[in-house]
Image: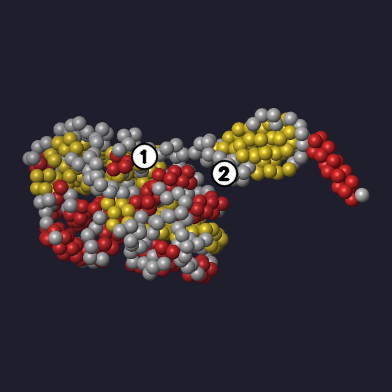
Amino acid sequence: MLLKKILAIIFIAFLYSSTYAQYYLRGEIRDEKNNSLSNVKILLHSTEYIYYSGDAGAFGIPVSKSTDSITVSSDGFQEISLRVDATKYQYITLKSLHPLPVAEKKTLLSTIKNLKPEDRNSWSVADETYSSLVENDFVGASKFPETGFAINANKASYSNIRRFINMGTIVPPDAVRIEEMLNYFNFNYTYPLPDSTFSFSSYLSQCPWNENNQLLFLNICAAKINLEDVPPANLVFLIDVSGSMDLPNRLPLLKSAFRLLVNNLRQTDTVSIVVYGSTVGLWMPPTSGDKKTEILKAIEDLNPGGPTPGEAGIHAAYQVAKNQFIRGGNNRVILATDGDFNVGQTTEEELEKLIVLHKQWGIYLTCLGVGMGNYKDSKLQMLAERGSGNFAYIDNEKEAEKVLMQEFTQTIYAVADDAYLNINFDTTLVKQYRLIGFDNKWSALKDSSNGLLGGEIGSGNSSVAMFEITPVNNNWDSISELKKKFAEVKISYRLPGDSITLNSSFDCLYYNTNFDHLPTSLRFASSVAMFGGLLRKSKYMRHISWNDLIEQSQKTCDPQDNMQKEFVTLVVKAKKIYRKEKRR
């Protein structure tokens, strides 16, 4: 009897399914790049049942009739509703809510059309990685009168160099980025005019390492944000708590750094903490900046362990930043790590695509590097560039205080985006020129389609750039009296959150200032450039010695400036290290 009832139920169920589920709607869901999308929600209108796509974006839904309608939705994509034919296989494409990034071509720090540099080998020290750089050569002005370079506020190279020298070891040449060494000192700040974003000045003088040439100084200063007008901040601390951070100069140093940053927070600011290591996710939910005790406790409770799933951490941090997005505010992820991403997307190209997509949401990225041994300078530099942000290396607590306390507004608040400078030389006066620093990666130079990648400029930032100039006429004094314009400079940039490109133009006069009469800060800046050249063993600085550098840096050092005094000490230490290396 029981068996008959069971058979009857099965028969009725079969008839029911035959009546109400006569068709099987099948298909797959992909994005605009043809990547399969899993876990996409599918609402079947006839029954109002919800289904989800599988791992490969595929789905199969029993339906009672040949035609029906569905609504397909997923986070980050436009929802669509459409009629479907169950007798046909469905191919559904979801469009991103944010435009998918076109392959980014602006990857150069400086550019001169049609030049083809020779190959260079990449440098590595232990497990540390540095992008292979090609030093800028002299360029004939008659053929290439115009050149350009990105302006940025990155300062990581200098403190990383200091770390190597204090360890008593030579510095990898590709870790030496002279423009970042100059940025570190914030030379000769001059307030821009009211309603102006930048002030500009130029000086022309003797080149201290080549008596036949001249040195052009360009000093660009960014406006300072009025502290009363500082917009509210939405900050996401993305902190690497993996096992590689379990050293005194890594996670403990970062915890000290973030404690300093918390002191600058206001009630209008919001802070979240995302971690990645043995776990990935939200460590501290969005918290008002005035709840410092809660924030400090969350920082103190961080402990290292596990792998380094950097990709997942970046995804999680940007999701939190997007959820808390403040229109007109300062939305920023602060990534703190040794850069050793060993789980997930690990190549620079893959990380680059990820960051380019996220920056389109108007969220900046600041990278703080720490550690030694497996420090990935190349990855952090690329992330900061692609994420419309800046990059600093923290080698001690004093540096943490400089970056996150003394220069808080420079580090956290931008006044200009995508900033780059073009200079056009008068070829009747300039025979050839060489941009000092702003050296490009060999991988970027190989692609002739690449162009300039402008940088983020923080509040109150001062940048010094230098060109070594060979004149057409060596009788500079007679020409100098005319004060003739020998170059025109144009700065292009966007205001934060704006898509309109703005331009400011300045004229450089052909007026020679005796080197001893230059502002002391600029003479000291030339010492910094010489230091970088000697560390890189530049072919253009073969005629100067470590003693020449020590003498000049001591003469031009400001005795009231502790950073400049430390620089002189580093130069003396470096001389001993490199002389030992030469004797080997």
* CA neighbours of label 2 inside 10 A, class few (<14), some (14 to 19), many (20+): few
Residue drawn at 24 percent across, 44 percent down: 120
Query: Callout 2: helix, strand or loop?
Result: loop
Hey, which quadrant is residue 126 in on the image? bottom left
Residue drawn at 47 percent across, 49 percent down: 363
Q: In the image, what residue type sits under mark 2? A: Gly
Q: Which residue is mark 1?
A: 106
Q: Which residue is mark 2?
A: 76
User: Which comes sooner in the sequence, label 1 or label 2?
Assistant: 2
Q: Percent x, y for residue 322? A: 53, 50
Hey, which quadrant is residue 460 in on the image? bottom left
Tell me the distance, in whole angstroms, between the alpha carbons under discs 1 and 2: 25 Å
Q: Percent x, y for residue 522? A: 21, 54
**Residue 501 visible at all:** yes
Q: In the image, what residue type sits under mark 1? A: Lys
Q: Percent x, y for residue 244? A: 41, 63
The image quadrant where one finds the C terminus is bottom left
